Image: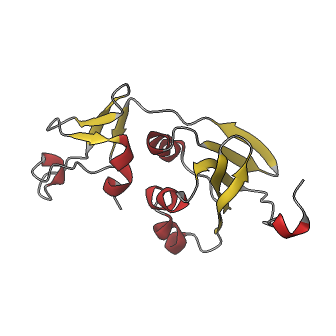
Amino acid sequence: MPDESERMLVSRIEEGTVIDHIPDWRANTVSRVLRMDKLARMQADVSVAILQNVTSKSFGRKDIVKIDKWHVDEKDADILCLVFPNITVNYIDEGKVSKYEPKVPDTIEGRIRCPELNCISNTEREPVLPRFNTLKKERLLQCHYCDALLAFDSVPEYVRT
């Protein structure tokens, strides 16, 4: 048990989401994928606690993101799973925890932009949502329209804002 100087006090949340087992010093990537900067403008009563480089029995060190009064969409959690396969997502409702195990989706539509600048999904005059098929074994996404490939690790750089 840690002594008093090693304890961190973060309020328990009654409604919201806790994202756990994020690799250490990577919580900012989670924030970018979830577009939390937009969340701050849309939901004034939401609070976020980001714990970085916390001791973990399983991982050595990890980050944790606690979001009070907001539930992360399961599709967004699945996108996080592309980048961080070991994350866990806990939804809290009236103080009760239910676990969601994110999984790599077969397809992703509308959330990630194609890395190929000339792809039809990147032109403003074409009303086409980007769509990717998942190549799970290769840890790649493949654009439905132009076949461009995007590594799972690169997903945060291409999240549509």
Residue 132 appears in view:
yes
Which residue is pictured at 50% across the width and 65% down the height? 36
Which residue is pictured at 20% across the width and 47% down the height? 128
Residue 19 appears in view:
no
Task: Say if 96 sits above or below 136 in the image.
Answer: below
Task: Say if 99 sits above or below 137 in the image.
Answer: below
- Nearer to me, 44 or 160: 160
Side of 91 relative to 43 (left or right): right
Picture quarter containing residue 63?
A: bottom right
Where is residue 150 drawn, in percent x and y?
A: 27, 42
Side of 60 relative to 104 (left or right): right
- Nearer to me, 57 or 140: 57
Q: Quadrant of the C terminus?
A: bottom left
Which residue is pictured at 51% across the width and 61% down the height? 31
Where is residue 140 drawn, in percent x and y?
A: 31, 35
Side of 142 relative to 155 (left or right): left
Picture quarter containing residue 142?
A: top left
Where is residue 58 drawn, in percent x and y?
A: 70, 40
Side of 158 relative to 31 (left or right): left
**Numbered label tally:** 0
- Nearer to me, 134 or 44: 134
Which residue is pictured at 25% across the width and 45% down the height? 130
Where is residue 108 drawn, in percent x and y?
A: 36, 39
